[in-house]
Amino acid sequence: MNNTGVEKKRVLSLLQPTGVFTLGNYIGALRNFVPYQAEYECVFGIADLHSITVRQEPAALRKAILECYAMGMAAGIDPKRSAFFLQSHLSEHSQLAWILNCYTQFGELSRMTQFKDKSVKNPENINAGLFTYPCLMAADILLYQANYVPIGSDQNQHIEISRDIAERFNGAYSPTFVIPEGIIQKFGNRVMSLQDPTKKMSKSDTNKNAVVLMLDTKDEIVKKFKRAVTDSEARVFYGEGKDGINNLMEIYLCVTGKSFEEIEREFEGKGYGDFKEAVGEAVFAALEPIQSEYYRLIADKAYLEECYREGAERARPMARKTLSKVMKKIGFI
Ligand code: AMP
């Protein structure tokens, strides 16, 4: 409930423990956590079960899970306010995922572009988990009766399949699951590569200058922005055929809160060099407090453990309630 006595809507977001956080992750996902917590009841988690669709080295996975948890907190997730847990600590996710597997068609899973992409990338390990991961993802969302799930501009298919599964189950029995909706933010839902602004900024890019990492130093960040690919027009404005500048302007808008018009005015009569430097500085200014908090948290494993254990205890009653409703409706004793 909020202070007007109206039930708050619930937002859910799970983070993949990949061990590398890019500026794309920050602008496209993490920076919204603070405003979400102000407006919604939030459920956040580390999607560690999802990470094993590709083979993981145990020590590296353990480290990546903790780093991801610490980064979530550093970016503003308040574990006293939101349920923030490790997905594998709640067996309800796997239990509901199995059930939802049986309400999902082979054909619809075959059409998922992520399955097709990952199968091409990992031809030696096209495992069943890779194929059925949308059922686990649907379970993550539906277990908590989430109203909203923040998604990137290319993740619509993920939320669509969760909605289809929920509607199918509700139709077969009676209303059981809230039908979730995706939230796509207006700006910053697709931060592009600094070296090829027609491509999304991605942690797997082999060109290190294309990707800004959340833990890069000021020097690294400013250098990467200085080397960013732009055009030869040398005038800062948002327009067609200016992919590089458009991307830098959108990044600047997201980290400073300025509008495109304000940015154009600020850099009127100035060259790209000044603009790129300003973007680099502004990005570092946004990341610096997160970096300090991250390093403080990652050094305090005992506190992190206290937080994720408490997070699981907060999440469990919500997950149990949904799962037991589902099991009863199906006819399990
Ligand atoms: P990933 O690390 O690719 O699993 O993405 C985690 C979250 O960060 C998702 O919500 C993505 O939409 C978001 N994200 C990742 N890369 C970008 C990007 N280049 N631009 C905007 N959002 C991104």
Image (tube, rainbow, N blue to C red):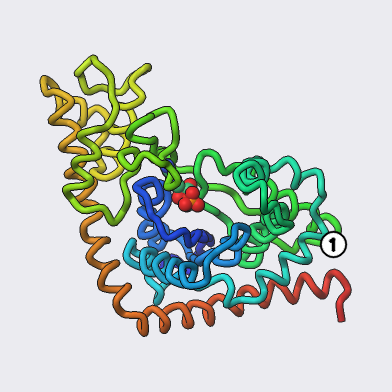
In the rendered image of this protein, does residue 320 appear above or below residue 53? below
| Spot occupied by residue 119 in the image (x, y as percentages of width and height) | 66, 45
Residue in front for this viewpoint, 82 or 157: 157
In the rendered image of this protein, does residue 90 appear above or below residue 237? below
Residue receiving disc 1 = 173
Q: Is residue 21 left or right of residue 131?
A: left
Which residue appears at 37% of the width and 17% of the height?
Answer: 240
Q: Amino acid at mark 1?
A: Tyr
Q: Quadrant of the C terminus?
A: bottom right
Q: Is residue 152 left or right of residue 298?
A: right
Mark 1 residue element: loop
Q: Quick one: which residue is furthest to the top in this view?
A: 233
Q: Is residue 112 left or right of residue 151?
A: right
Which residue appears at 42% of the width and 41% of the height?
Answer: 205
Residue in front for this viewpoint, 54 or 299: 54
In the rendered image of this protein, does residue 230 appear above or below residue 186? above
Which residue appears at 38% of the width and 78% of the height?
Answer: 304
Q: Is residue 284 visible?
A: yes
| Spot occupied by residue 156 in the image (x, y as percentages of width and height) | 59, 42
Number of residues whose C-alpha sits closer than 10 Å to that of mark 1, classed few (under 14), some (14–19) or many (20 or more): few
| Spot occupied by residue 203 in the image (x, y as percentages of width and height) | 42, 47
Q: How many marks?
A: 1
| Spot occupied by residue 135 in the image (x, y as percentages of width and height) | 71, 57
Residue in front for this viewpoint, 233 or 3: 233
Q: Is residue 5 visible?
A: no
Which residue appears at 60% of the width and 44% of the height?
Answer: 121
